[in-house]
Amino acid sequence: MDKKNFIAIAIDGPSASGKSTVAKLLASKLNFLYVDTGAMYRAYTLAVLNASLDPKNEEESNSLINKIEISFNDENHITLNGKDVSKEIRENNVANNVSYIASYKNIRLFLVSLQQKIANNKNIVMDGRDVGTYVLKDAEVKIFLNADVEERAKRRFNENKEKNIKSSYEDCLENIKKRDYIDSHRDFCPLRKADDAILIDSTNLTIEEVVFKMEEIIKSKGYSL
Ligand code: CDP
């Protein structure tokens, strides 16, 4: 890819729309760093649960701000206080509580500032809910990835099965609907398509087709791959 400066690609969208899978693939094809901001909210949630604090209580949850260390190791796995927690953050107890944690403004500010530090002066693909609207609002390329809620529940159910995480299709559907609602109704940085983001509906697309569409979008912005 030609580059005069660093290029940031922001990929936002609701739960299980396929963001992480395609963002990771795209980043590896372009040789860009990949940052999964959802993993950071999940790691914070895990820290709250591990400390026996109540994720539904904002004040209690805020008490870990600046007291925990969340980062990515050499394998690009998420770490909490130096420990690889990439498996633990996918468990149901984290999935069921993460949207409360992500609705607290001070926790968002803490994690957004980490995200901006990681992205500084790098070619980067970052995925989340507010990357194009807030975290990297000057990103060169912005994509909003969506899919029908039933298709997303099916994908999450299959993903859980592969990872040996117990769940039913109905549980996945309920969890996704609940998170969609909380994510898009919170006051600070709700899930929303940036005005200048390009929408991709992945309901009937394979992973490769989505990545292909993304590459076409990047090229249409004048960047050669
Ligand atoms: O894997 P999935 O798409 O279900 O979610 P995720 O990307 O791991 O994010 C987990 C949760 O973190 C989301 O449901 C949001 O509540 C929150 N989140 C957020 O608020 N802002 C972000 N930039 C990323 C995630």
Image: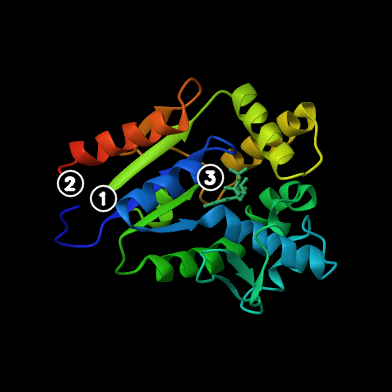
Q: Secondary structure at mark 2?
A: loop
Q: Residue at x 68, y 64 (%)?
A: 85
Q: Amino acid at mark 1?
A: Glu
Q: Residue at x 52, y 56 (%)?
A: 37
Q: Amino acid at mark 3?
A: Pro
Q: Spatial distance from mark 3 to mark 1, Cα to Cα?
A: 21 Å
The reply to whether dot 2 and dot 1 touch (C-beta < 8 Å) is yes
Q: Residue 6 location in percent, x, y?
A: 24, 62
Q: Residues within 10 Å of mark 2 (few under 14, many from 20)?
A: some
Image mark for residue 140: 1
Q: Amino acid at mark 2?
A: Tyr
Above or below, comparing residue 154 to residue 81 in the picture = above
Image mark for residue 190: 3
The first of marks 3 and 1 along the sequence is 1
| Residue linked to disc 2 | 223
Specify whether residue 110 is in view: yes
